[in-house]
Image (cartoon, rainbow, N blue to C red):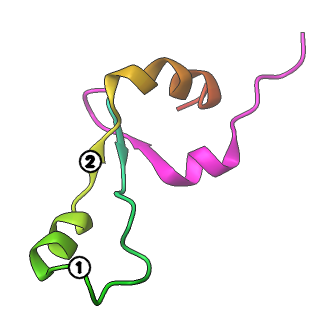
Amino acid sequence: MPKMKTKRAAAKRFKKTGTGQLKRNKAYKSHILTKKTPKRKRNLRKPAMTDASNVKNMKKILPHL
């Protein structure tokens, strides 16, 4: 049986919380910011939790998290 390796791209993007949920940063905050409202940009700064429908796949690519 080969070693179970972590997908490094995913490891850099997701962190595990104390309760075991996966925390992620929101998208759409890198460029073309002039047309986005300050309120929208402010809300994009806040981290979000990974959706329940993706958790099974995330646990697979992050086995040691």
**Left or right side of 28 for 46:** left
Q: Is residue 10 magenta?
A: yes
The stretch of residues the image draws in magenta is 1-20
Marks 1 and 2: in contact by CB < 8 Å? Answer: no
Q: Residues within 10 Å of mark 1 (few under 14, many from 20)?
A: few
Residue 30 picture quarter:
bottom left
Near-viewer residue (8 or 40): 40
**Left or right side of 42 for 35:** right
Image quarter where the N terminus lies is top right
Picture coordinates of residue 25, whole percent (x, y):
36, 56
**Residue visible at 34% across and 44% down?**
23
Q: Residues within 10 Å of mark 2 (few under 14, many from 20)?
A: few
Instruction: Tell me the residue that label 1 is attached to.
Output: 36
Q: Is residue 8 magenta?
A: yes
Q: Which mark is residue 48?
A: 2
**Residue that sits furthest to the right in the current view:** 1
